Amino acid sequence: MHRRIILLTLGLLAMFRPQAQVIVTDTLAAEPLAPADSLPPIPDSAVFIEKTGEIPAIRHYGTDWNNTNTRAAYSFDQSRTYVLPLDSAHFVFPAQAGAVISPYGPRSGRMHTGTDYKQKLGDPIYAAWDGVVRMAKNGYYGYGNIVVIRHANGLETYYAHLSKVMVRPNQKVKAGDQIGTAGRTGRATTEHLHFETRFLYQSFNSATIIDYASRRLATDTLMVVKGKFYTVEAYRQRSSTATLNIPITEAVESDSLLSSLQDSLSVPLAKPLPPVKQITTARPSVHVVRSGDTLYGIARRYHTTVAKLCQINHIKEDGILSLGQKIKLP
Ligand SMILES: [Zn+2]
C-alpha cells in the first residue's frame, strides 16, 4: 500500500516537474540550461570581478557572471516590479538596414526567443548599448557564433549566427562598437542576425522597445511588471485612467529617479495617450510635458541632468509634472 502511494507520488512529481528549461533557436535546437551550482567560477571572470569591479548591473545579478553559458540560475522574479531606464541617448541599432524575417514568439510550437533580422554575409553587427561582453563564443549550440553583452540597467543583448566574433569576453564596449559580422553559423537557414533582449535571463520581445521600422528606440523606460514587459507608456495606457500606484521595488537608478517616476506615475490621465514617442535628436528650447514623461526621462532625452532642469525651471526633483507643462531646456 505504502509502496503504491510512494510510486504514485513519484509519478505525480515526475508529471509536474517543471519542463526542462530550454530555449530554442532558429531551427529549433534546444540549449541546455546550466544549473547555477554546476557553473564553477571561471578564473578569467573571477579576476575580472576582483580587478575591475565593473560587472554591470550587480544590483540584479550579484556576481553571477560567466563566460560559458548564455544563462545561469533562473533568477527572474515574477512578483517584482522593475523600472529599467533605457539609455536612449546612446542606443545604436545593432545591424545595418535589413528586414525582420522572423519575429519573437511562438513558432512551430516552440518559442523563438529572438528577432531575426536579414543581413548579408559580413555585414557589421554593433553593440546596441554600452556594456561589457559576457560571452563571445564560437559554435555555441544553435546560436552558432554568439556575443552576449550585459548592460548597466540589467538588460542583456544577444547577437547570434555571426560569421565572425570581434570582441573578447569581459571586454567593455560602447554602443555602436562593431562586435562581429553577420552570418549563418549555428542552426540558421539564411544569413541574419538573431537578436535577443533579456532581463535576468528571461527573454522578451525586443520589438517592445525597438521600433524595427525606424530602427530606433520606442521608449526610454522599460517596465517589468508581474513577469510582463511593457514600455512605460503602454503600461500607463493599460492601467486605466485612474491614478497609478505601482510598487516600485527594484531597479531604479537613483532616489531622484524613483521619486520622479512615482510622481509621474500618479499623474491622472486626462485623455488618450499620444502614439509612442520617438526619440528625436532635434533640440527645441522647451519640452511640453506629455503623459509618460518623467524628469529623468526628459533629462536623458535632451542630454542634460535632472538637477539642471530643476534649476532653470525652478522646480523640485520630487515635484509633480503636469500634462502640458513647459519645461525649459538648457
Ligand atoms: Zn532567430
Image (cartoon, rainbow, N blue to C red):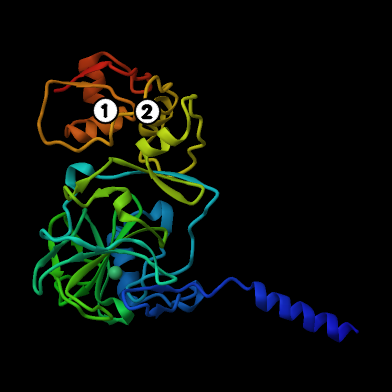
Residues at discs 2 and 1 in contact (Cβ within 8 Å): yes
Left or right of residue 205: residue 62: right
Determine which of the numbered discs, if any, sits on residue 41 in the image.
none
Residue at the limit of the structure toward the right, as seen here: 1
Residue where numbered disc 1 is placed: 306
Indicate the position of residue 70 as horizontal and vertical percent values.
Answer: 36, 71
Q: Residues within 10 Å of mark 1 (few under 14, many from 20)?
A: many
Indicate the position of residue 57 as horizontal and vertical percent values.
Answer: 36, 53
Please state which of residues 323 and 42 is positioned toward the viewer in this rendering: 323
The correct choice, above or below, for 79 with respect to 271 in the image is below
Corner quadrant of residue 188: bottom left
Corner quadrant of residue 103: bottom left
Position of the C terminus by quadrant:
top left
Indicate the position of residue 14 as horizontal and vertical percent values.
Answer: 66, 78
Q: State the residue at coordinates (36%, 26%).
A: 272
User: Label 2 vs label 1: CA separation?
Assistant: 10 Å
Residue 32 visible in the snapshot: yes
Q: State the residue at coordinates (66%, 76%).
A: 15
Residue where numbered disc 2 is placed: 260
Position of the N terminus by quadrant:
bottom right
**Amino acid type for the residue under numbered disc 1:** Val
Mark 2 and mark 1 lie on one chain; the one further toward the N terminus is 2
Left or right of residue 233: residue 248: right
Left or right of residue 23: residue 181: left
Please state which of residues 139 and 268 is positioned toward the viewer in this rendering: 268
Left or right of residue 77: residue 165: left
Residue 152 visible in the snapshot: no
Q: Residues within 10 Å of mark 2 (few under 14, many from 20)?
A: many
- Pair 2/1: label in front: 2
